[in-house]
Structures are given as C-alpha cells and as structure tokens.
Image: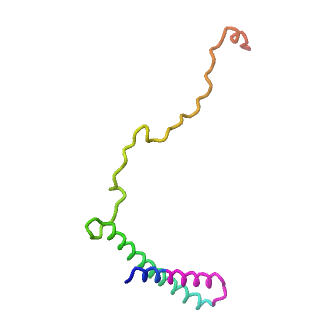
C-alpha cells in the first residue's frame, strides 16, 4: 500500500459514512433501505477501524528504535522531577479574622 492510498481509502470511507448518516437522518428511506444502509455503514466503520489500526502499527514501527513494532507506554516515559520551584504555588484557604480578646467592658454587657 502506498503512503497516500491508506489516506485516500480512509477519506472515501468517511465520505460514504457521512452520506449514509445524512440519508438515515433524512427520514426519506423505507425501513428496508434504512436497514441496508445501516448494514453498509457498519461494514464501513469496520473498514475504517482496520485502516486506522494499520496506520497506528506503521506509526509504532516508525517510532521504535530498532525498526520492530514496539508500543510506546506513557508510563515508561521519564518523569521530570518536581521541585518547589517547578510546582505551581498553592494558595492557602482564607482564614477567618482572628477574634479579639474580650475586654473588661465587654463582660459588663452580659444580659444575665
């Protein structure tokens, strides 16, 4: 398969799927026609998934160091150590205003 053949095939699959969706949403098809278009759409989705899977395998092969297919696992990527300077500053929650100490005058205002 050439580099552009896969893209061209995928583009054709997507265009045909779009036309099927429009026809189904249009409501002008009979039940039998709708079922036929739906079945065609399912087959096209599977074909598109196959094309995408092939493309993913090719990308994995191109990214592997030794030319063999090797998936890239994000967990295996080196982590940048976090330091106080690299971490975003965390703002403390606002504190309620401090109570002022009771004065002797405040004690006289007790209603009992």
Residue 72 percent coordinates (x, y): 34, 63
Would you say 42 lies left or right of 112 here?
left
What residue is shown at x 62% (from left), y 82% (from top)?
Answer: 22
Question: Can you say which quadrant of the picture contains the C terminus?
Answer: top right
Magenta span: predominant SS is helix
What residue is shown at x 55% (from left), y 87% (from top)?
Answer: 37
Q: Is residue 17 above or below residue 102?
A: below
Which one is nearer the viewer's eye here, 17 or 56? 56
Q: Is residue 76 above or below residue 71?
A: above
Q: How is the image coloured?
A: rainbow
Which stretch is magenta?
Answer: 11-29
Residue 96 part of the magenta-drawn span: no
Would you say 83 lies left or right of 16 here?
left
Residue 100 percent coordinates (x, y): 63, 17
Tell me which corner region of the image, top left, top right, bottom left or bottom right, holds residue 35.
Answer: bottom right
Residue 94 percent coordinates (x, y): 59, 32
Would you say 68 lies left or right of 86 here?
left
Residue 24 part of the magenta-drawn span: yes
Tell me which corner region of the image, top left, top right, bottom left or bottom right, holds residue 33.
Answer: bottom right
Image label count:
0
Tell me which corner region of the image, top left, top right, bottom left or bottom right, holds residue 18.
Answer: bottom right
| Residue farthest to the left, as pictured | 66
Question: Can you say which quadrant of the picture contains the N terminus?
Answer: bottom left
């Amino acid at each position: 398969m050439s580099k552009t053949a896969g893209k061209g095939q995928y583009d054709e699959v997507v265009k045909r799927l779009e036309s099927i969706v429009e026809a189904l949403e249009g409501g002008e098809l009979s039940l039998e026609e709708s079922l036929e278009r739906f079945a065609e759409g399912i087959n096209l989705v599977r074909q598109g998934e196959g094309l995408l899977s092939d493309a993913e395998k090719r990308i994995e092969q191109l990214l592997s160091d030794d030319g063999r297919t090797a998936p890239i696992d994000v967990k295996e990527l080196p982590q940048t150590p976090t330091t106080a300077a690299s971490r975003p500053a965390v703002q403390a929650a606002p504190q309620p205003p401090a109570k002022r100490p009771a004065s002797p005058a405040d004690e006289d205002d007790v209603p009992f």
